Amino acid sequence: MLPKFFFILITVLTLLVSLFVNGDSKFSNPHFIGNRSVITHLMEWKYDDIGDECERFLGPYGYGGVQVSPVNEHAIMDGRPWYERYQPVSYDIHTRSGDEQQFRRMVQRCNKAGVRIYVDIVLNHMTDGQSGLGTNGHHYDGVAMQYPGVPFGPNDFHGHETCPTNDLEIHNYSNRIEARNCRLVGLRDLKQQSEYAKQKQVDFLNHLIDIGVAGFRSDASTHQWPDDLRSIYSRLHNLNNEFFTENSHPFIYHETIYYGGNGINSNEYTSLGRIIEFRFYKEITNVFRNNNQLRWLRNFGTEWGLVPSGDALVMIDSHDLRVGHTGQLGFNINCFEARLLKAATAFMLAWNYGIPRVMSSYFWDQIIRDGKDVNDWVGPPTDQHGNILSVHPNPDMTCNHEWICEHRWREIYNMVKFKLIAGQEPVNNWWDNGDNQIAFSRGNRAFIAINLQKNGNDHDKNLQKRLQTGLPPGIYCDIISGNLINNRCMGKSIQVDKNGLSDIYVGHDEFDALVAYHIGARVES
Ligand code: ARE
Ligand code: CA
């Protein structure tokens, strides 16, 4: 009787813990290896380069996974804008990033290096009303709604019988029916209720799963009925046993842009995986732009109205935000404001909320006119024939000019390590100056201090304080200003006394707005 009771109790407890850690859906677990916990989006990278990057950098530096740009055949558009990848023509794996063979090789190499692959999937729609060729040579005709590469025909799309607007366009994003059954910016809207269309999409996803991906970013989820997605997911294979344990389900995170108010609430999708919590991006950006004080971050998370941590995937920047899409240009923080981006990203990686995703972009000539980036369409760097350029990292870890490689910036990759070392330790030892200076530890494993103080004289603006770090006594390197090499700190360091106290300093005009320490960067005496 007693053992049985304990068995039930333990099962219930394990279930509760897994709900807490992995969210409440069977699609919420990213299947990271060990304590890895961060995804980077290598936007538009070629698969051969991603394979190299997994082996030479992402694996060794503790990244958990890569989001790859849409992999299936898409429209070839004039000027080759990045967003052509969001206009599917068929479900063949063939883009400028590589063909199916190259994709397979990348998935193998990355899994072996301990790095998972998540594919951005565009199931809501096909192309706009143009016609032409796709990246695998299939013809398409958006007006006639003919996509022989699948094949899809007019019956597979929403029309006047299901979409209530005259021009079949979405005008009111808060109206459920309109948002799901009408066209998003002119894109032909698939009728996922149709058994035929559904099966084509299931086959595509299962093909990717069998190759060995760990999951998907679901593009434009808000524009797809949760019940249709549920029915598609119910037919998905378990993940490939070569790389994943038995009975593993794909990780799925949804693009549901919800800032509160009347819009379609993202919690309609939390039973289908995680949601990309746009309120995280918005609130953090607001704070780091000094529109709100850092001290309020003390209870950042559900108390701010965000979904539970286990239901969220979070970011500071994304392939859209970068150029002012899905957010507000000028408000968003991207690679052109490196100091701010590093500080906000560091907070995201130090805080214990959601699964963080680090944006890794390429250079484009940002020109802002009337609140719009006129170059918001510019595609990845290519040669004169339109082939995407390879990434050739420099010895100092940075990339060549055309690839920004934010994920390789020391301040960022070292914070990925910080998060890995912090594990599930709670936030402790919170301190703030009542304004824009904060510090906290993660248990007794890691400590961070951020200074964005703008008000007061120079003395007030510097963070200079004896603080409880939570760390065991010793000398620690600040991983923001330099690495620990041959038992020496290349940047700043601190001494922590036997009580965990240390003199913390972050000058207001320093190169970086923060310092961070952890037990993996301690000088051996
Ligand atoms: C391009 C052109 C359009 C043109 C269209 C068809 O820019 O002018 O009409 O082609 O010819 C990406 C680009 C788009 C691009 C599209 C297709 O961002 O510019 O259109 O590819 O090539 C809404 C959706 C959300 C969506 C955003 C962009 O809800 O799902 O709009 N985001 C995803 C991706 C995008 C991608 C698509 C979807 C399409 O992340 O990269 O588009 O696959 C409020 C609303 C949001 C709304 C947002 C728009 O916040 O609440 O729902 O997001 O405004 O800013
Ligand atoms: Ca739709």
Image: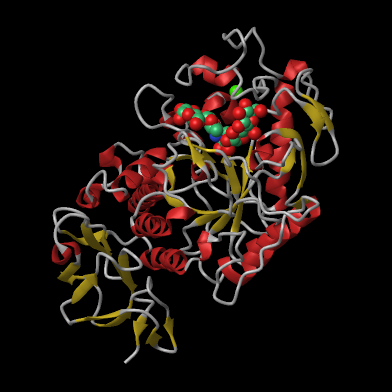
Residue 170 left/right relative to 5: right
- Residue 445: x %, y % from top left: 31, 70
**Residue 274 against residue 476 in the figure, above or below:** above
| Between 272 and 42, the one nearer to me in the picture | 42
Q: Residue at x 73, y 19 (%)?
A: 156
Quadrant in which residue 23 is drawn: top left
When asked about the image quadrant of residue 344, the answer is bottom left
Residue 477: x percent and y percent? 34, 79
409 lies left or right of 384: left
Coordinates of residue 342 in the picture (x, y in percent): 40, 59
- Looking at this view, name the residue that lies furthest to the bottom: 525
In the picture, the quarter occupied by the C terminus is: bottom left
Q: Is residue 12 left or right of residue 443?
A: right
Q: Determine whether 137 is above or below 390 in the image.
A: above
- Compare residues 515 and 298 and report the one nearer the observer: 515
Q: Is residue 243 above or below residue 258?
A: below
Toward the viewer: 481 or 163?
481
